[in-house]
Amino acid sequence: MLEKIDLSKKMDKKKQKEIYEKESARLAVLQRACKAAGMPVMIVFEGLGASGKGTQINRLIQAMDPRGFVVHAVNKESQEEAMHPFLWRFWTKIPPKGQIAVFDRSWYRTVLTDRFDQRTPEAALPQAFEDIRSFEEQLTSGGYVLIKLFLYISKEEQKKRFQKLLQTEETAWRVSKEDLQRNKRYQEYLDMNEEMLQKTDTDFAPWTIIEAEHRDFAAAKIMTVVANRLQAELDKQKNEEKKPVIKDTGESESFRSGALSGVDLTKKLSRDEYKKRLQALQERIGFLHNELYRLRIPVVLGFEGWDAGGKGGAIKRLTSHLDPRGYLVHPTASPNDTERQYHYLWRFWKDMPKDGHITIFDRTWYGRVMVERIEGFCTKEEWKRAYREINEMEQHLVNAGAVVLKFWMQIDKDEQERRFRDRMNNPEKQWKITDEDWRNREKWDQYEVAVNEMLLRTSTSYAPWIIVEGNDKYYARVKVLETVIEAIEKKIKEKQGKKK
């Protein structure tokens, strides 16, 4: 790709000024149009050291309303960022609808400078590239516009710019030892960039190479490329709006006889046995929680199930002996006004635990393939795509060292009705029952189809679903604790084995 680029390209100042002023005015109009259309935009600046990323970002944003964009300078990971999965710090920086985020370097750092400096092992590169492609596809499929610009200069030009910066104290700090080393081994680092471009140049997130030897030419090209892309995406959105939106609930018989049909709901424990086993299990998980923190192992637990299925009771027994400083429980409701301005996974990504901590989600990202699917809050294309997106997210968490478990709390229809009526008749529990619970019950069969398909498509070896027989609360609570303990013990053994 790069060997075909003509770095001698330039234009006279008069022509450059005409193009720059024309495209600046157009970009200002397009920014307002993107805001009105609720279109989130991410502009990524990558490229070789001293290629002018900072200068070009500054020239680009001069045309924009500063209230509508934010610039992120991506450097080495902070201590907090290093304790989360690689993509966490970028998911937390994606813009809401109608806003623009500009990245001065980005998630590509892991396959470029970190690779060159041997912080990213060669064996980890295939997964890193896959994570990047997945991240970008999830964003663009979810309505984000992703514009990727690569600024390219020659070895000689780079060396000349470094030398100029080093001449004064005011600018010398901008040149690091690593920068000089990459110039010395220019071809080696260029090959890494070439590989990155080839492996991440996709239809949904293509790269644009910017010939950056001549700054005025580069500025005019960047302004034109960004404006053209925004205009094309706005035109595309208008055409999409003209098409009828079919909200498909997916009421298929294909999954009627699925995983739920074989669950034995007669399983139960006596009160005495329950108390005995519960105490031992809670003491064990309290001990393991300390080990998780010591070994810096993160844990993600998701709870789904029928209304009144026992999620709250299971979570309460699970956390009773945990150090409250080392875990969080996130009850997930319908997205609020702020959350609706982002990709549907954003609100879950920002709450993922750091190393050594436990996060428990009381209802999860699986709402996309259940309630949103059944109630028509998303299209058929969106919920079908979500299976892959969710699997990829969970795979990334596991690759980062997390334990990921998902529990489906299963009860039958009669048991649910009994619990509903018990709540209605008990003043201390009436707050737990709503009209919506009864309405959802009327759609039991539709939800059963959706749940069976969800279990089939998203129960993986790395992030399995555990169906919990929940008609007997004692049995259900013990099974949850036993399953979590078994998974944590297995992970601790793996971690200790690697240290040896």
Image (cartoon, rainbow, N blue to C red):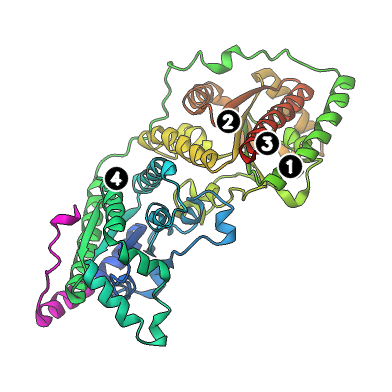
Between 128 and 38, the one lying in front of the other is 128
Q: Name the residue beneath numbered marker 1.
A: 291
Ranked by sequence position, the earlier of labels 2 and 3 is 2
Badge 2 marks a residue whose secondary structure is helix
How far, Cα to Cα, is label 2 from label 4? 45 Å
Using the image, tell me which numbered label, if any, was put on residue 492: 3
Q: Label 2 amino acid?
A: Asn
Ranked by sequence position, the earlier of labels 1 and 2 is 1
The image position of residue 250, as x and y in percent, is: 41, 26
How far, Cα to Cα, is label 1 from label 3? 8 Å
Q: Nearer the viewer, mark 1 or mark 2?
A: 1
Between 483 and 69, the one lying in front of the other is 483
Ranked by sequence position, the earlier of labels 1 and 4 is 4
Left or right position of 142 against 257: left
The image position of residue 464, as x and y in percent, is: 56, 28
Label pair 2/4, CB-CB below 8 angstroms = no
Badge 4 marks a residue whose secondary structure is helix
Q: Name the residue beneath numbered marker 4.
A: 199
